[in-house]
Image (cartoon, rainbow, N blue to C red):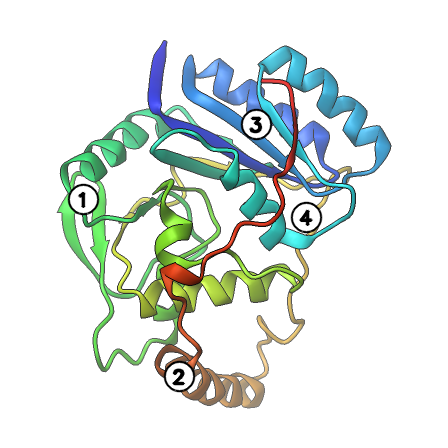
Amino acid sequence: MTHFAPITLLITHYNRSQSLRRLLEAVAGLNCSFGGIVVSDDCSRPEHLTVLQHLRDEFEFVLVTTPQNGGLGHNINKGQDAVQTPYTLYIQEDFVPQPAFIPELRAALGCMEQDSTLDFARFYAYIPYPYMTPYQGGFSAMHLPRWGLDYTKIYMYSDHPHLRRSSFLQKFGRYAEGLPGDKTEYRMCISFLQNKGKGLFFRDFKALLAQENDTAEPSTMTRNSLTNTQNPVIAAVRYVYRQLKYNADIQFMPRYHPQSSRRTAPPKTGGG
Protein backbone atom coordinates (compact mmCIF):
# COMPACT_ATOMS: atom_id res chain seq x y z
CA MET A 1 0.00 0.00 0.00
CA THR A 2 1.26 3.45 -0.95
CA HIS A 3 -0.12 6.03 1.45
CA PHE A 4 0.02 9.75 0.65
CA ALA A 5 -0.74 11.24 4.06
CA PRO A 6 -0.16 14.91 3.03
CA ILE A 7 -2.55 14.65 0.06
CA THR A 8 -6.34 14.75 -0.19
CA LEU A 9 -7.88 13.35 -3.37
CA LEU A 10 -10.49 15.91 -4.51
CA ILE A 11 -12.95 14.65 -7.13
CA THR A 12 -15.60 16.85 -8.73
CA HIS A 13 -18.74 15.00 -9.80
CA TYR A 14 -21.93 15.70 -11.74
CA ASN A 15 -24.36 13.00 -12.92
CA ARG A 16 -21.68 10.40 -13.63
CA SER A 17 -21.74 8.09 -10.64
CA GLN A 18 -20.54 5.01 -12.54
CA SER A 19 -17.55 6.97 -13.78
CA LEU A 20 -16.86 7.95 -10.18
CA ARG A 21 -17.03 4.31 -9.12
CA ARG A 22 -14.57 3.41 -11.87
CA LEU A 23 -12.13 6.06 -10.64
CA LEU A 24 -12.39 5.03 -6.99
CA GLU A 25 -11.99 1.36 -7.88
CA ALA A 26 -8.94 2.19 -10.00
CA VAL A 27 -7.33 4.04 -7.08
CA ALA A 28 -8.04 1.11 -4.75
CA GLY A 29 -6.72 -1.32 -7.36
CA LEU A 30 -3.41 0.54 -7.41
CA ASN A 31 -3.07 -0.05 -3.63
CA CYS A 32 -3.03 3.69 -3.10
CA SER A 33 -4.54 5.69 -0.25
CA PHE A 34 -4.63 9.34 0.78
CA GLY A 35 -4.89 11.52 3.85
CA GLY A 36 -8.49 12.06 2.78
CA ILE A 37 -10.88 11.81 -0.14
CA VAL A 38 -13.45 14.54 -0.90
CA VAL A 39 -16.14 14.13 -3.54
CA SER A 40 -17.79 17.44 -4.43
CA ASP A 41 -21.14 16.96 -6.16
CA ASP A 42 -22.90 19.69 -8.15
CA CYS A 43 -26.54 18.78 -7.43
CA SER A 44 -26.67 15.53 -9.41
CA ARG A 45 -29.98 13.83 -10.19
CA PRO A 46 -31.50 11.70 -7.37
CA GLU A 47 -30.52 8.38 -8.94
CA HIS A 48 -26.86 9.45 -8.94
CA LEU A 49 -27.03 10.82 -5.41
CA THR A 50 -28.32 7.44 -4.24
CA VAL A 51 -25.28 5.78 -5.80
CA LEU A 52 -23.02 8.39 -4.21
CA GLN A 53 -24.38 7.53 -0.76
CA HIS A 54 -23.47 3.86 -1.30
CA LEU A 55 -20.05 4.77 -2.68
CA ARG A 56 -19.40 6.98 0.34
CA ASP A 57 -20.02 4.06 2.67
CA GLU A 58 -17.88 1.74 0.56
CA PHE A 59 -14.89 4.03 -0.03
CA GLU A 60 -15.15 6.24 3.07
CA PHE A 61 -14.98 9.70 1.52
CA VAL A 62 -16.37 13.07 2.53
CA LEU A 63 -19.33 13.93 0.28
CA VAL A 64 -19.92 17.66 -0.24
CA THR A 65 -23.32 18.42 -1.78
CA THR A 66 -25.32 21.49 -2.74
CA PRO A 67 -29.08 22.16 -3.02
CA GLN A 68 -28.78 23.65 -6.50
CA ASN A 69 -26.38 23.42 -9.43
CA GLY A 70 -23.68 26.05 -9.09
CA GLY A 71 -21.39 25.16 -12.00
CA LEU A 72 -17.80 24.00 -12.11
CA GLY A 73 -16.33 26.94 -10.20
CA HIS A 74 -18.66 26.53 -7.25
CA ASN A 75 -18.14 22.79 -7.25
CA ILE A 76 -14.34 23.10 -7.04
CA ASN A 77 -14.49 25.89 -4.45
CA LYS A 78 -16.69 24.02 -1.98
CA GLY A 79 -14.71 20.83 -2.47
CA GLN A 80 -11.42 22.61 -1.83
CA ASP A 81 -12.89 24.18 1.31
CA ALA A 82 -13.37 20.68 2.74
CA VAL A 83 -9.71 19.67 2.24
CA GLN A 84 -7.68 19.47 5.44
CA THR A 85 -4.25 18.35 4.16
CA PRO A 86 -1.45 20.58 2.77
CA TYR A 87 -1.73 19.13 -0.75
CA THR A 88 -4.68 18.43 -3.04
CA LEU A 89 -4.77 15.94 -5.93
CA TYR A 90 -7.53 17.28 -8.16
CA ILE A 91 -9.17 14.85 -10.60
CA GLN A 92 -12.53 15.03 -12.39
CA GLU A 93 -14.59 11.86 -12.26
CA ASP A 94 -14.02 10.76 -15.86
CA PHE A 95 -10.28 10.07 -15.41
CA VAL A 96 -8.72 6.70 -14.59
CA PRO A 97 -5.19 6.58 -13.11
CA GLN A 98 -2.80 4.05 -14.67
CA PRO A 99 -0.12 2.06 -12.80
CA ALA A 100 2.60 4.52 -13.88
CA PHE A 101 0.75 7.31 -12.08
CA ILE A 102 1.68 6.35 -8.51
CA PRO A 103 5.48 6.74 -8.76
CA GLU A 104 5.08 10.02 -10.65
CA LEU A 105 2.67 11.35 -8.03
CA ARG A 106 5.28 10.48 -5.41
CA ALA A 107 7.92 12.27 -7.49
CA ALA A 108 5.75 15.37 -7.89
CA LEU A 109 5.07 15.51 -4.17
CA GLY A 110 8.80 15.24 -3.51
CA CYS A 111 9.51 18.12 -5.89
CA MET A 112 6.91 20.34 -4.24
CA GLU A 113 8.11 19.50 -0.73
CA GLN A 114 11.67 20.38 -1.75
CA ASP A 115 10.79 23.55 -3.67
CA SER A 116 8.35 25.82 -1.86
CA THR A 117 8.00 28.06 -4.94
CA LEU A 118 6.17 25.36 -6.92
CA ASP A 119 2.39 25.80 -6.90
CA PHE A 120 1.29 22.67 -8.75
CA ALA A 121 2.28 19.76 -11.01
CA ARG A 122 0.28 18.71 -14.10
CA PHE A 123 -0.17 15.04 -15.04
CA TYR A 124 -2.44 15.19 -18.12
CA ALA A 125 -3.03 17.41 -21.14
CA TYR A 126 -4.36 17.37 -24.67
CA ILE A 127 -1.25 19.09 -26.01
CA PRO A 128 2.17 19.89 -24.44
CA TYR A 129 2.79 23.27 -22.89
CA PRO A 130 4.84 25.28 -25.43
CA TYR A 131 7.52 26.75 -23.15
CA MET A 132 9.33 24.35 -20.83
CA THR A 133 12.79 23.49 -19.52
CA PRO A 134 13.82 20.12 -18.01
CA TYR A 135 13.34 20.03 -14.25
CA GLN A 136 13.62 16.58 -12.68
CA GLY A 137 12.82 13.06 -13.83
CA GLY A 138 9.93 13.13 -16.29
CA PHE A 139 8.91 16.67 -15.32
CA SER A 140 9.69 20.00 -16.95
CA ALA A 141 9.20 23.47 -15.51
CA MET A 142 6.74 25.69 -17.39
CA HIS A 143 7.63 29.32 -17.98
CA LEU A 144 6.12 32.31 -19.78
CA PRO A 145 8.44 34.18 -22.19
CA ARG A 146 7.84 37.88 -22.35
CA TRP A 147 7.32 37.75 -26.11
CA GLY A 148 6.04 34.18 -26.48
CA LEU A 149 3.86 34.02 -29.61
CA ASP A 150 2.27 30.61 -29.01
CA TYR A 151 -1.12 31.54 -27.60
CA THR A 152 -1.46 28.20 -25.81
CA LYS A 153 0.93 29.78 -23.29
CA ILE A 154 -2.27 30.86 -21.54
CA TYR A 155 -2.81 27.27 -20.37
CA MET A 156 0.03 27.04 -17.90
CA TYR A 157 -2.81 26.27 -15.50
CA SER A 158 -5.33 23.57 -16.46
CA ASP A 159 -8.31 21.85 -14.83
CA HIS A 160 -6.89 18.51 -15.96
CA PRO A 161 -5.54 16.25 -13.17
CA HIS A 162 -2.87 17.95 -11.08
CA LEU A 163 -1.31 18.10 -7.64
CA ARG A 164 -1.48 21.51 -6.00
CA ARG A 165 -0.91 23.14 -2.66
CA SER A 166 -4.16 23.35 -0.73
CA SER A 167 -3.45 27.07 -0.25
CA PHE A 168 -3.94 27.48 -4.02
CA LEU A 169 -7.12 29.55 -3.67
CA GLN A 170 -5.45 31.95 -1.25
CA LYS A 171 -2.77 32.78 -3.83
CA PHE A 172 -4.76 32.69 -7.07
CA GLY A 173 -8.31 33.41 -5.94
CA ARG A 174 -11.43 31.31 -5.86
CA TYR A 175 -12.75 29.86 -9.09
CA ALA A 176 -15.20 32.12 -10.90
CA GLU A 177 -18.78 31.03 -10.25
CA GLY A 178 -21.85 31.36 -12.45
CA LEU A 179 -19.89 30.93 -15.69
CA PRO A 180 -19.58 28.02 -18.17
CA GLY A 181 -16.80 25.59 -17.29
CA ASP A 182 -14.40 26.71 -20.04
CA LYS A 183 -14.69 30.37 -18.98
CA THR A 184 -14.17 29.41 -15.35
CA GLU A 185 -10.96 27.62 -16.32
CA TYR A 186 -9.85 30.58 -18.46
CA ARG A 187 -10.25 33.01 -15.56
CA MET A 188 -8.02 30.79 -13.41
CA CYS A 189 -5.47 30.55 -16.24
CA ILE A 190 -5.23 34.35 -16.31
CA SER A 191 -4.96 34.62 -12.53
CA PHE A 192 -2.23 31.98 -12.47
CA LEU A 193 -0.12 33.97 -14.94
CA GLN A 194 -0.83 37.35 -13.34
CA ASN A 195 0.19 36.07 -9.92
CA LYS A 196 3.42 34.50 -11.23
CA GLY A 197 2.40 30.90 -10.68
CA LYS A 198 5.04 28.19 -11.04
CA GLY A 199 4.28 24.65 -12.12
CA LEU A 200 5.64 21.39 -13.46
CA PHE A 201 4.40 19.49 -16.51
CA PHE A 202 4.84 15.73 -16.97
CA ARG A 203 6.21 15.37 -20.48
CA ASP A 204 4.68 11.95 -21.27
CA PHE A 205 1.27 13.40 -20.48
CA LYS A 206 -0.82 10.56 -21.93
CA ALA A 207 0.90 7.83 -19.89
CA LEU A 208 -0.42 8.46 -16.39
CA LEU A 209 -4.21 8.81 -16.70
CA ALA A 210 -6.86 7.85 -19.23
CA GLN A 211 -9.92 10.03 -19.84
CA GLU A 212 -12.94 7.83 -20.46
CA ASN A 213 -16.31 9.19 -21.59
CA ASP A 214 -18.66 6.46 -22.77
CA THR A 215 -22.13 6.90 -24.28
CA ALA A 216 -23.82 6.00 -21.00
CA GLU A 217 -22.10 8.87 -19.15
CA PRO A 218 -20.73 11.36 -21.72
CA SER A 219 -18.80 14.49 -20.88
CA THR A 220 -20.91 17.31 -19.46
CA MET A 221 -18.45 20.01 -20.61
CA THR A 222 -19.60 22.09 -23.59
CA ARG A 223 -17.24 24.25 -25.65
CA ASN A 224 -17.53 26.73 -28.50
CA SER A 225 -18.12 24.84 -31.76
CA LEU A 226 -15.55 27.05 -33.53
CA THR A 227 -12.70 26.04 -31.25
CA ASN A 228 -11.53 23.09 -33.35
CA THR A 229 -12.61 24.27 -36.79
CA GLN A 230 -10.44 23.32 -39.78
CA ASN A 231 -11.58 26.31 -41.86
CA PRO A 232 -8.30 28.22 -42.60
CA VAL A 233 -9.98 31.64 -42.65
CA ILE A 234 -11.68 31.10 -39.32
CA ALA A 235 -8.45 29.63 -37.91
CA ALA A 236 -6.47 32.71 -38.98
CA VAL A 237 -9.02 35.12 -37.51
CA ARG A 238 -9.11 33.06 -34.32
CA TYR A 239 -5.30 33.19 -34.05
CA VAL A 240 -5.20 36.98 -34.30
CA TYR A 241 -8.13 37.36 -31.93
CA ARG A 242 -6.54 35.12 -29.31
CA GLN A 243 -3.17 36.86 -29.55
CA LEU A 244 -4.85 40.19 -28.86
CA LYS A 245 -7.31 39.02 -26.23
CA TYR A 246 -5.04 36.71 -24.26
CA ASN A 247 -2.19 39.20 -23.99
CA ALA A 248 -4.60 42.01 -23.11
CA ASP A 249 -6.26 39.90 -20.42
CA ILE A 250 -2.91 38.95 -18.89
CA GLN A 251 -2.03 42.64 -18.62
CA PHE A 252 -5.35 44.29 -17.87
CA MET A 253 -7.92 41.83 -16.48
CA PRO A 254 -8.67 42.85 -12.87
CA ARG A 255 -6.17 41.01 -10.71
CA TYR A 256 -7.04 38.85 -7.74
CA HIS A 257 -5.73 40.09 -4.41
CA PRO A 258 -5.41 37.59 -1.53
CA GLN A 259 -7.02 39.90 1.00
CA SER A 260 -10.19 39.98 -1.11
CA SER A 261 -10.78 36.23 -0.76
CA ARG A 262 -14.08 35.32 0.88
CA ARG A 263 -15.50 31.89 1.49
CA THR A 264 -19.10 31.13 0.68
CA ALA A 265 -21.41 29.61 3.28
CA PRO A 266 -20.05 26.35 4.73
CA PRO A 267 -20.75 23.44 2.35
CA LYS A 268 -23.08 20.57 3.21
CA THR A 269 -21.02 17.50 3.95
CA GLY A 270 -21.70 13.93 4.83
CA GLY A 271 -19.75 10.81 5.66
CA GLY A 272 -16.03 10.35 5.75
Residue 143 vs residue 38, the one in the foreground: 38
SS at mark 2 in the image: helix
Q: CA distance from mark 1 to mark 2?
A: 28 Å
Is 24 rendered above or below residue 71?
above
Q: CA distance from mark 3 to mark 1?
A: 30 Å
- Say the numbered circle drawn on residue 116: 1
Q: CA distance from mark 3 to mark 4?
A: 15 Å
The answer to which of marks 3 and 4 sits earlier in the sequence is 3
Is 73 rendered above or below residue 268?
below
Provide the residue designation for mark 4: 219
Q: Position of residue 246 (x, y in %)?
A: 42, 79
Provide the residue designation for mark 3: 23
- Say the numbered circle drawn on residue 223: none
Q: Quadrant of the C terminus?
A: top right
| Dot 2 amino acid type | Phe
Is 150 rendered above or below residue 210?
below
Q: Position of residue 96 (x, y in %)?
A: 52, 31
Going by the image, does 134 lie left or right of 235?
A: left
Residue at left 34%, top 20%? 5
Going by the image, does 96 lie left or right of 103?
A: right
Q: CA distance from mark 3 to mark 2?
A: 39 Å
Provide the residue designation for mark 2: 252
Q: Nearer the viewer, mark 2 or mark 4?
A: 2
Going by the image, does 32 lie left or right of 267?
A: left
Q: Quadrant of the N terminus?
A: top left
